[in-house]
Amino acid sequence: MRKAIVAGNWKMNGNRESITQLMEALVAELNGLDAVETLVCPPAVYLSQVKGLIGNASIALGAQNASQFESGAYTGENSPVMLKDLGCEYVILGHSERRAIFGETDQEIAEKFKAALENQLVPVLCVGETLEQREAGDTMVVVGSQLRAVLDACGVESFKQAVVAYEPVWAIGTGKTATPEQAQEVHEAVRAIVAEYSAEVASGLRILYGGSVNAVNAAELFANPDVDGGLVGGASLKPNDFIAICRAAAEA
């Protein structure tokens, strides 16, 4: 039985005051919600603050990115060693914004994936297609290529300690959401690709949906057999919405 997980990606948002208010609400409502694993991923500069606010609550801490390098002359990078030292358990890798805006390649993402695992961080590997690629019928060509790059570089056994997030680029921050049927179709295909390497690993792999998940559509999305939770963007900054999404995952 795969345990659902809901991850909040705050992106480059928040300040000390707003983060304190958000975390106080989340700790009060989500601590002890054992049927779902909850995770928050603040900007790197606020990781220590959020770790302190989590305290002993059952909320995990994640980073939004990590370098493939552990230390050295890499100005501005976030070392996986340092992220682990700050108390991170997870790290988002290959987000569409990292791919599109910062030009991260499949090879670089595979290297980051490997470095994260070597430092006991759970990678949340993001895969997804643009609107043009979907309309051209290339969704699984794109998603499959992104996924296989990491499978081939790191080995399928590494996915025992990883999470995959399917995030259709056309649904991120746009208010558009893949239908439950569209989400299930791609999630099922992702699991099938991993099963080509190992049926056992594929069966246990948690695959999240990301793309304008909100309090209204969460339950319907999570009801799909291959959707194991969500990677939540804008709604993760609204405590009531994020709490509702986490509860929907717990009840799915």
Image (cartoon, rainbow, N blue to C red):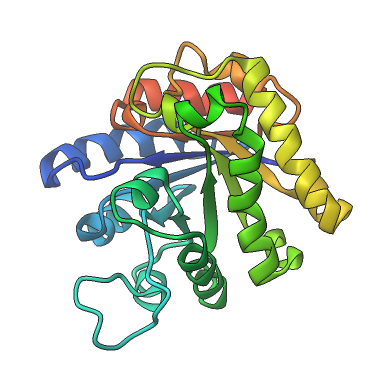
Q: Is residue 131 left or right of residue 63?
A: right
- Outermost residue toward the top in this view: 216
In this view of the protein, which residue sits in the foreground, 161 or 115? 115
Residue 148, image quadrant: bottom right
In this view of the protein, which residue sits in the foreground, 149 or 41? 149
Number of numbered discs present?
0
In this view of the protein, which residue sits in the foreground, 181 or 108? 108
- Outermost residue toward the front in this view: 136
Residue 39: x %, y % from top left: 46, 45
Q: Is residue 109 visible?
A: yes
Q: Quadrant of the N terminus?
A: top right
- Outermost residue toward the right in this view: 199
Q: As displayed, is residue 16 above or below residue 174?
A: below
Q: Is residue 161 visible?
A: no
Question: For the point 56% across and 72% down, which residue is it?
Answer: 114
Residue 109: x %, y % from top left: 48, 63
Question: For the point 33% across and 85% down, which residue is it?
Answer: 71
Question: For the point 55% across and 27% down, which residue is it?
Answer: 134
In this view of the protein, which residue sits in the foreground, 93 or 43? 93
Q: As displayed, is residue 187 above or below residue 96?
A: above
Residue 75: x %, y % from top left: 19, 77
Q: Is residue 26 left or right of residue 206?
A: left
Q: As displayed, is residue 168 above or below residue 100?
A: above
Residue 20: x %, y % from top left: 20, 42
Question: For the point 29% across and 26% down, which residue is it?
Answer: 238
Q: Quadrant of the C terminus?
A: top right
